Image: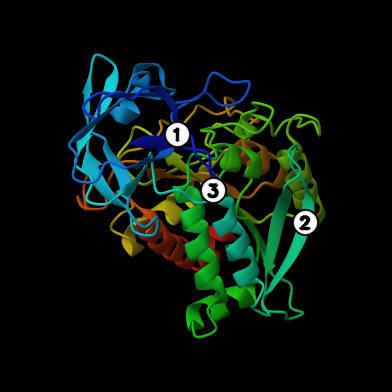
Amino acid sequence: MQISQNFDGGNIEVVSAESAHDIRLNIRHDQDSEFYQWFYFRLSGARNIACTLKILNAAGAAYPKGFENYRVAYSYDRQHWNRWPTSLANGVLSIEITPEQDSVYFAYFAPYSMERHADLIARSLQSARCSLEVVGQSLDGQDIDLLKISSGGSTPTKHCWLIARQHPGETMAQWWMEGALEWLLDPTNAQSRALLERCTFFVVPNMNPDGSRRGHLRTNAAGRNLNREWAAPAMDAAPEVFVVREAMAREGVDFFLDVHGDESLPYCFIAGVEGLSGWDESSQAQLDFYKNRLADLNPDFQTAVGYPPKAPGEANLTMAGGHVGHHFGCLAMTLEMPFKDTTATPEPTVGWNGPRSKALAHSCLLAVGDYFDSKVSQ
């Protein structure tokens, strides 16, 4: 019996594994950071053996409520991820399972590896609608990829920015990106063709490649939370934000969506930037239109539960949404998806997962078109 994690996105530390009934583990902290919650590891050599795996430091995780009523993602082939119940007692998260095969993988959410990211970029570039700009490198020397999706026409279009995975452990955000790119680049999709006649999309599928490969929850190689670096990013600490900000300044932004995951709340929702000092009735109407339209298009999305809005003047301009909304005066939002499952539309076998994230992306893009067709966007 063996526990391993030395692979792309892996994270676990073995405290002891002398008995299958008492496998003791800890989640490794992000580099130079107190954050931890993401885990991803492999159990091998335990086929048909009743195992109890205990994550001892669950209580000290960044979001301990994220482990309440939580079902772990597991897979035998790393392609299909299902859910398995866990129990939480005295700050220890326990998984009791009898593996059906010689090798089984466990993860906080279905992983999205940097290899899959490379495949996504390469596959997207097979479309004539798509071009690539490497806007810079991360601290570990990985490329920061920016895809431009357009119809190729000469008519001026709205510039829509989509970014994901500032927090690398929120892998549902890149599953969402995979769905968005597939929808935008589908040559048989009349709706995407119509949208691209009005909008050019600038897409950063992974803002934090270093944290993704290292198995971090929220930070990059320097231990920086990228979604608190937008006010004044430094190249030696948050080059990912610095170079994307420069590209935004060059191209302009008319619409912005930052895609994330929430550890604790079992809902899909949008957080706006109501705290901006210039927030007014027109701004609120734009946000309300988009959220309500998305709720109409996709039953997994709802508007009743989310983060409480900030009062005018209290926006955090170090965050992407606040920074972009303030500097470009556009509709800027953060989309949150659950690590658990959606309360109103549960799917117990798989929970919230990659395919559902991809389907939500399709609805989000349809709502973009409806937003620019509406009077509130004028």
Spot occupied by residue 359 in the image (x, y as percentages of width and height): 39, 63
What residue type is disc 1 on? Trp
Q: Nearer the viewer, residue 202 or 81?
A: 81
Residue 38, label in figure: 1
Spot occupied by residue 355 in the image (x, y as percentages of width and height): 37, 61
Q: Is residue 227 visible?
A: yes
Q: Nearer the viewer, residue 119 or 362?
A: 119
Mark pair 1, 3: CA separation: 39 Å
Q: Is residue 166 visible?
A: no
Location of the C terminus (image quadrant) = bottom right
Q: Nearer the viewer, residue 79 or 336?
A: 79
- Examine the rendered structure and indicate whether residue 197 appears above or below residue 319: below
Q: Which residue is found at the position 75% from the left and 37% from the top? A: 139
Mark pair 3, 2: CA separation: 36 Å
Spot occupied by residue 20 in the image (x, y as percentages of width and height): 24, 30
Q: CB under 8 Å between callouts 1 and 2?
A: no
Q: Which residue is found at the position 59% from the left and 20% from the top? A: 33
What residue type is disc 2 on? Val
Residue at numbered disc 3 = 282
Q: How dense is the environment of label 1, judged by Cα within 10 Å: few (below 14), some, or many (20 and up)?
A: many
Residue 62, label in figure: none
- Tell us which disc is closer to us: 3 or 2: 2
- Examine the rendered structure and indicate whether residue 162 appears above or below residue 56: below
Mark pair 1, 2: CA separation: 27 Å
What residue type is disc 3 on? Ser
Residue at numbered disc 2 = 134
In the rendered structure, which disc, 3 or 2, sits on the residue that comes first in sequence? 2
**Label 1 element class:** loop
